[in-house]
Image (cartoon, rainbow, N blue to C red):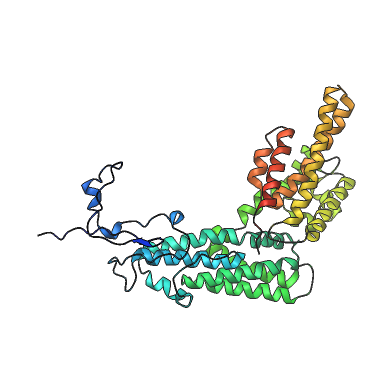
Amino acid sequence: MPTPTVVVSRVLDVGQQQLVPRKAPHPPEPARPPQPAAQAARPPSVVPPPPRALAPPGPRPRVPQVDSGMPGESLWDSVEALLDDVDAGFGAITGETPPQTLRDPTAAKAVPAAASNPESLAAARELFAQLATTHVRHVRDFMIDVKAGAATSEWLSLCIPSIDGVKRMAEQFEMADLVKALETYLAALKDAAADTAFSIDGAPRDKLLATYAPLIGLLPAAFGLDAVKSRREGIIVQSLLLQVPGVRKVTIDKIYAAGLTTLDAYYLAKPEEIAQTTGIDRTLAEHISERFRRYKAEVQAAVPDENRSSEHAHLEALTKKLATEHAGFERAEKDDDSGRKRELRKARETTFLEIKVLMARVGEVELLARIEKVPFGLKVAELEKYLDQAKNRPRTA
């Protein structure tokens, strides 16, 4: 006689009552058609857990034991415990309240060993990598400034706890190579913090760059810089050049042909060197060099925080300025005042170039690409919407 099929369901907390595992399906409700026999006979080992978003508030109940070959825990119980630990770990990094769990915190390091199913552990590690990508975003911003030679020691107080938190989570997933690389980079951050210099350069800068490089190879989605840096820096360099009076497209072509395409190149190059290598006028080269020196000072003067409050405050002021200039342009157009229109058109373009620099700096490259294509009235509306969302965004600790 074949063994009767056992249908396993999850224990749900519904107050005074509980739904428990049962050996026979409940009679179908009148409004619901009966389940097909093939579906009812599905082996219990492949019954998926209910979606995490639908779980009731409060402690997560334990999943009934399913024979998955794991001692003491079911496959799904182990996977969900892994996800609990990831949530709790990154909640600690951001200062958010971690989800409640029935697992003993002291047993966290034993979770990867319990989840002996390679596919389950790989999926949990993938989730860890995705979360790490979000939570080290300001570390990437910091390292972009380090590479450009514009980083300040004020960023270290944000980067050190974040890297330490990611390291502790990587330890739980037994990612030994990543843990070792994070420990080395963390030591470099702490050494740089011990240096009281405001700007990070010289030996501390070299050490940060050298110890960060292995992280890119181990977790490129979270720590990769080149793609992010090139997209942001291209916008910033071009926008700064176009803010210099007398710079036109032909001038930019000459400058790029000479290899001056990165911020650090402009920070290091002297006006006479720019003039000699590009063939442009010496006076114009001096104006270009001055604009990039001023930008570097602006970057170093910005007070760093994870919410980019300094940049957003500046962006809000520029957005109001752009709105005023656009309203004036529309009035001049209505009055058919060509001189005033020409003046305000130039003013709008200059203000938007400054906005582009800020948007690229805070990483809003996709939003910038979208609003560049719309009329100025819609540009203002999109920027105001973005700033409103930034103000209402939950603050991180």
Q: Quadrant of the C terminus?
A: bottom right
Residue 82: percent from the left, percent from the top? 44, 66
Please say whether residue 70 is visible from this viewpoint.
Answer: yes
Rendered position, 309 above or below 208: above
Relative to 16, is 96 on the left or the right?
right
- What is the x, y in percent for residue 167? 55, 71
How many numbered discs?
Answer: 0
* Left or right: 284 in relation to 397: right
- Left of 69 or right of it: where is 350? right
In the image, residue 47 lies at what x, y percent?
31, 56
Depth check, front residue: 82 or 355: 82
- Give me the residue at 88% from left, 47% from top: 282
Q: Is residue 121 visible?
A: no
User: Which residue is rendered at x = 45% and y = 58% of the image?
Assistant: 56
- In front here: 319 or 340? 319
Name, please, the residue furthest toward the top.
336
Q: Position of residue 362 (x, y in %)?
A: 69, 52
